[in-house]
Image (cartoon, rainbow, N blue to C red):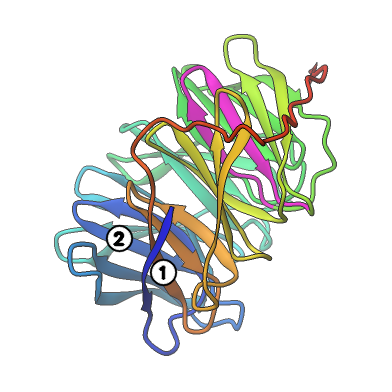
Amino acid sequence: MNEGATLVFNAGDNTPRNLLVEGGYLYASLWDFGGGISKVVKVEIASFTLVSTLIITALDGKCAGMVVSGNYLYVAVADGPGHVAKVDLATFTVVDFLTVPGPGAQQVFQLATDGTFLYATTYQGTNNLFKISLATFAIVDTLAIADGGGGKHPLIYNGFLYIPSGNIITKVNLTTFAVAAILDLLVVFHDDAALARVGDFLFQTDNGNPGLMSKVDLTTFTKVGELTLNSQSPRDLVLIYLSLYTCHFGSNEIIQVNPDTLLEVEVLTLSAAASALNCLAGNSLFVGSSLSPGKVTMVTVPSAPPTPPATTIPQVITLPATVY
């Protein structure tokens, strides 16, 4: 891995919370802890320059998850109550705005889509999953799910939606929109968890100190391995060229993990310009820094399959799993 250029956002555009690559552009949702305006920043990847900043709403500035379906970008706004914004990618304007029902603390945090419906999870302290029709942009169903704390980053695979929350993963059947199973990872959970899939295996990070990565066999929905990372606070997780990459909020590190062996392959410590690492995206890796103003750093990653160094000490622990 090699650190490349760092792009600094405009003054007042703080704390990128999620990153998304689509059609030659990088989109960064902003989570401003200072209570600013909800925004999404658009960056042209080829020139690595700012294109524009879109104000989603004048409400408290907490934009989070983003997904693209068709010609639209959907953005989660974690206010209480929560919202989902629909953005026309061609004009980069908000064309619709949905408010979820429920208590004031019910903040929409992350999104997933199967191309027909949008699925919105809520932040810690609430436990609703909202099913939203893309055709009508209206809520068509609501499902109560287990709440283990922290953010809930959903992932869709083979007709099921997987939702991490604390030390548990909830498996939802999208055909019946019902909970199919709940897996207890048997870890001490600390904060937000992120998911990535490699073949028939699911990987989840635990934002602790040191950080953890759990490996789950999707065919049996059981935990089959655990890696204790040689750093702290893994904050996001992406798959690029058969390697997993996670960024560490407290130590300015990007860690490459071999998903087959569940071993660390390489650690890249970024310069002070890229600190408080918060989110990842892209085939060329983009890393968001939770600063004021926000920053995005480009990282070149290897395209060959990962090979762990001979000196790496295995840290795989096979544990029993509890499925409710």
User: Residue at horizontal 27%, vertical 68%?
Assistant: 43
Q: Position of residue 5 (x, y in %)?
A: 34, 71
User: Residue 74, can we see it?
Assistant: no
Q: Position of residue 222 (x, y in %)?
A: 70, 16
Amino acid type, label 2:
Leu
Q: Residues within 10 Å of mark 2 (few under 14, many from 20)?
A: many
- The quarter in which the C terminus is drawn is top right
Q: Secondary structure at mark 2?
A: strand
Q: Nearer the viewer, residue 283 or 265?
A: 265
User: Residue 106, can we see it?
Assistant: yes
The single residue placed furthest to the front in the displayed view is: 310
Q: Quadrant of residue 170?
A: top right
Q: Nearer the viewer, residue 82 or 229?
A: 229
Kindly identify which residue carries mark 2: 26
Kindly identify which residue carries mark 1: 296
Left or right of 271 on screen, residue 135: left
The span shown in magenta is 192-208
- Say above or below: 103 vs 257: below
Q: Residues within 10 Å of mark 1 (few under 14, many from 20)?
A: many
The single residue placed furthest to the bottom in the displayed view is: 11
Say which mark, if any, is on residue 88. none
1 and 2 marks in contact (CB < 8 Å)? yes
